[in-house]
Amino acid sequence: MHCRLTASFRYSACLAILSAATALAQHSTEAIHVDDVSHIFRIDAADTTYEFGVNEDKRLQTIYWGERLSEKDHPQPPKAAPGVASFDSTRNTTPLEFDAWGGGLYVEPNLKVTFPDGNRDLDLRYIGYSTRDGVLSVQMKDISLPVAVTLQYKVDEATGIVGRRALIKNETAKPFVAESASSATWNLPRGTNYILRYLSGRWAGEWTVNDQTVKPGKTILESRRGTTGSQNNPWFSIRKNDTTEENGDVWFGGLAWSGSWQIAIEQDAVQQVRITGGYNPFDFGYHLKAGGMLETPWFYAGHTSHGLGDASRRMHHLEMDTLVPRAPHERPRPVLYNSWEATEFKVNEAGQEALAEKAAAIGAERFVMDDGWFGMRNNDHAGLGDWTVNPQKFPNGLKPLIDKVHSLHMDFGLWVEPEMVNPDSDLYRKHPDWVLNFAGRPRTEGRNQLVLNLAREDVRQYVYSSLDKLLTENDIAFFKWDYNRNWSEPGWPAVAPDEQKNVYVDFIRNFYSILEELRKKHPNIEIESCSGGGSRVDLGVIHLTDEVWPSDNTDAFDRLRIQYGFTQAYAPGIMMAWVTDSPTWVNQRTLSLPYRFLSSMQGSLGVGANLTKFTSEELETSRKMIAEYKNLRETVQRGDLYRLISPTDGSEASVTESVSRDRQQAVLFAFLHSSTELYSYPRIFLRGLDPDRVYTLRAIEGKANSDTPTSATGSYWMHRGIDVDLRGDFQATAFVLQGASH
Ligand code: DGJ
C-alpha cells in the first residue's frame, strides 16, 4: 500500500489510511517514509531530515534531525541508551520523542497523570501508526491501562519545518487529571557547544534577543499569565557556538498556543539537549472525563545549516505561506491609519472624520477608530464589556463615519477588547459571576479591568454575538482585537472544583473558536492581534489573525531593536508599524519624518500620528513615502528578510534588506544612531540577489557615495557593496534595487 503524504500542512491530501496491521514492508511517500520492518519513521522535506524509530523497549526514540540524509543511507533501528549507574535509568538517558512520568523518570516529562485510585505511574509503548491528510499519527498505549497517546507529525515541504502535537485519550471508565501535558520533545545531537537564543520583554519593551550557552540543567521559557505574554515569547533557537547570521546549524521552533505555555531547554546527565514544550505545568490539572481527549498545541520546529537569518526566513515562509488565515498571504497588508495616539479616548464623529480626510489624502487605505467609541468609555475606568456605540459621541451610530471613510476610498476598522470587562459597566453589574475569580476572594484589577471567563459557554456566546452583531450591522473590514492585562485568580466557581483548572485550555480553545466562527460567517474580515503591544504573538494566534501589533512603543529608533527581535521569529508581513508624532511619548526623542517612515516601512506600514497637526510639507512627505511603500510592500511583506547589521549590542548602525521572492527587487534600509570620531558608515554588502542580473539603484531617501554606480550586477552589490552617506545623529537612508528582466 502506498500512502502519499504531501508536505503542505494546508492543502495536503493523503490518499490512503494505513494501519500497522495492513501495511506493507516499506512506504515511501513524498515527504514521510515509514519502514514497517525496522519501524523507522523518516521525514524528508526541503533540505532537512527528521527521523525516529521504535527501540527494543518499544519506546519512540529520535534517530536524527538535521541536514537532509541521502536516500542511500538507512540508519539502523535505534537502541536505548544505557543508564548511568543505578541513578539514571535508561529513560533518562535515551532521547525519547515523548515519555510519560512514571518509573524513575527525572527529565522533563511530556505527560503526568493522577488516576482516581492514587496511581500516578504511566508507561507508554508503541502500538502502531496511521496516516491521513498529510498527518502521520503514531499510537502509544500504557503497558496496562487504557490510556492512549497519539503523536502527530506533519511537515512543510518548502521549509522542512515539522509540526508535532499529542492527543491524550482517556479510555478508562473514570476521569483522570493530566497534571502536565506537552506537545513534543525535540532532541538535538549530543554535544555541549550549543547557544540558546530566546526573546524576552515587557510592556513597551518587547522582543529583546538573549543568547546564552546551554549548560547542564534546565532553562524554562514560559508564561503563567493565561496568555502568551511578552516576558518570554514561545519561540526558541539553538545553534552551534560557531554559527553566525549567515552560516552554521540552527534548530528553531515555536509553539502555536496563546495561553500559559512552557518550553524547557534541558541538558541531561549524558549531555543531551532536549526541548520540551506545551501547556505550562504550573497550576495545570486538566480533568479528562472517561472517553475524553486532550489535544496539545502544535509545536513547530525546523533545522537549517545556513545560519540564524535563514532560520528566521524559514519561519517567515511558514507563517506567510501556510499558517496565516489566507495563506499563501497574497493580499498585501493595506496602509492603515489608527486614531489612538492622536485622540486616545476622545473620539467623536467630527474628529474622526477630520482625521479620515487627512489619512485619505496621504494615501491610507484603511481607517481604524481605536478605543473610546462604545459604552461609557471616556477613560480606562469604564465601559469595557458594553459593545454598543456611545450615543453622545456618535448620535447617529457608526454609519455616518463609515460612509465618510468609504467615500474617501478607505475601508473601516474598529478597536475591540472582547475578553475584558470594567467593573464600571452594565455587563459587570448584570453578570459579576462572569469573570475569572475564586469565590469570596479579591478580584485583582489591571488597567481597571477584569478578565471574562471565556471558558464559560454563556460568556463565549456573549462575546461571539457582540462581535457578530457589530459586523452584521456595520460595514467593518477590520478589528483591532486588544487584550490589556494578564490573568489573576483564575478560578471558575461555576464548575466542580476538580474541573476548574480546565480553564487554562478551554478559555483559549473558545478564543480560537470565536475567531474561527467570525471568520467563517464574515469571510472578508481581517483581524489584528494586539495585547497592549506584543503580548499575544504566537503561531496559534497567527493562524487566525492577519497581522499583529508588536509593541505600544512607537519610537522609531526603539522600533529598530524591537523589529530586529520580532523578525527572529515572525514575518515582517504581519508586523504592523505606525509612524507617530515626534517627539514620541515614549522617550521624548525627536526624529525626522523620513526616519520615522523608513523605520515603519520595514514592516506593514501604518500611520498613528495626529495628522490634523501636520504641516502641508509633512503631509506631502507622508504622501510620497506611502506612495513609495505601495511599490515595494510586496517585497517587504512577502520577500526574504536579511538582517545585514544588527542594531543591538551598542551598534551605531542598523541595516535590513528585503528581497522579493523572484529576486527582481530588493529594498535596503539603513539607519545611523550617532556618528563618532570621523568614522564613515560601514559598507553595506547586500545578500540574496541574483548574481548575474543587473540591478539599478535608486534612492528613496538620502544618497549613496558619489562613486557608486547607478546600476551593477547582483554580484557587485553583494561583494563590492554600497557606501552610503550617513553622518550625524538619527539619520536614515533607503534604496530600491530594481533588477532587469531576464
Ligand atoms: C493598547 C493598544 O496597544 C493601543 O494601541 C491602544 O489600542 C490602547 N490599548 C487602547 O486602549
Image: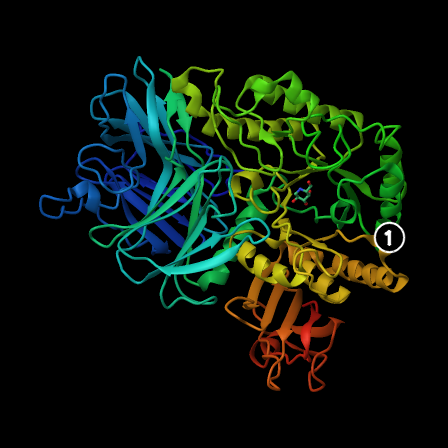
Q: Is residue 690 visible?
A: no
- Residue ID at (24%, 31%): 125
Where does the image place residue 424, in percent across and percent down from the top left? 68, 26
Instruction: Determine whether, in the image, residue 229 is placed left or right of residue 469.
Output: left
* Nearer-the-camera pick, 79 or 563: 563
Where does the image place residue 4, in percent across and percent down from the top left? 43, 38
- Ligand 1 placement by image quarter: top right
User: Which amino acid, by three-letter code, is at mark 1?
Assistant: Thr
Instruction: Determine whether, in the image, residue 120 is placed left or right of residue 327.
Output: left
Where does the image place residue 217, in percent across and percent down from the top left? 27, 51
Q: Is mark 1 within 8 Å of ligand 1?
A: no
Q: Which picture quadrant has residue 299?
A: top left
Instruction: Determine whether, in the image, residue 487 is placed left or right of residue 26.
Output: right
Where is the C terminus found, in terms of image quarters?
bottom right
Q: Is residue 41 visible?
A: yes
The residue where tag 1 is placed is 612
* Above/below status of 523 relative to 221: above
* Above/below status of 621 relative to 257: below
Where does the image place residue 114, in percent across and percent down from the top left? 28, 24
* SS at circle 1: helix
